[in-house]
């Protein structure tokens, strides 16, 4: 299973950006959303489309220091079942082979890992440059 991407020192970086200019951390949020969109686009293009609700349920939410891609929800509560599989229905009679790594979200994170890291790095460098900090 693909691991989440964690940035050591991000909270301190955001606090220092906020000291320079309160709006600077917002540039990180935009960059993180761009990185998450890579996973969303990958997953949405691979989800089976009957009504389109399952694919539309895949979306990114973010804060200044975190971005999360989620699926399912009230409009498509079956989406995690499509992604990971398992048994559902009366007497658990409907079976989809279980895939621990998932078929869509984690697969997207693994497939787009290098592009995601590049997008996150670019947004961190852009925020530092906007703050007037020189980065090698």
Image (cartoon, grey):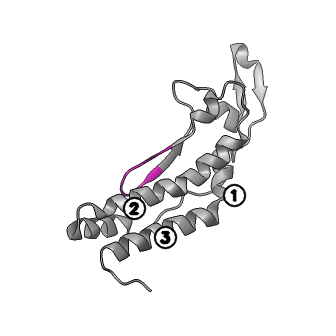
Magenta region: 60-67
* Residue in view at x 70 percent, y 13 percent: 90
Pointer 3: residues within 10 angstroms few (<14), some, or many (20+)? some
Can residue 8 be seen here? The reply is no
Residue at position x 44%, y 86% from top? 136
Labelled disc at residue 122: 3
Q: Mark 2 vs mark 1: which is more N-terminal?
A: 2
Residue linked to disc 1: 111
Mark number for residue 28?
2
For the residue labelled by badge 1, is the local secondary structure a helix, a strand or a loop?
Answer: helix
- Secondary structure under tag 2 reads helix
User: Which residue is more in the foreground, 3 or 41?
Assistant: 41
Q: Badge 2: how crowded within 10 Å, few (<14), some, or many (20+)?
A: many
Question: Which mark, by number, is residue 61?
Answer: none
User: Given this view, does label 2 or label 1 mark the residue nearer the observer?
Assistant: 2
135 vs 94, left or right, is left
Report the mark closest to the observer, 1 or 3: 3
């Amino acid at each position: 299973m693909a691991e989440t991407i964690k940035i050591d020192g991000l909270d301190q970086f955001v606090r220092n950006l906020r000291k320079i200019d309160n709006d600077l951390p917002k540039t990180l949020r935009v960059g993180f959303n761009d990185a998450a969109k890579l996973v969303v686009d990958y997953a949405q293009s691979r989800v089976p489309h009957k009504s389109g609700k399952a694919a539309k349920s895949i979306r990114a939410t973010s804060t200044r220091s975190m971005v999360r891609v989620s699926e399912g929800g009230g409009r498509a509560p079956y989406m995690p079942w499509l992604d990971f599989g398992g048994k559902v229905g009366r007497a658990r009679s409907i079976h989809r082979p279980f895939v621990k790594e998932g078929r869509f979200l984690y697969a997207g994170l693994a497939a787009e890992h290098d592009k995601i890291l590049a997008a996150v790095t670019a947004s961190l460098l852009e925020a530092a440059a906007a703050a007037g900090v020189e980065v090698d």
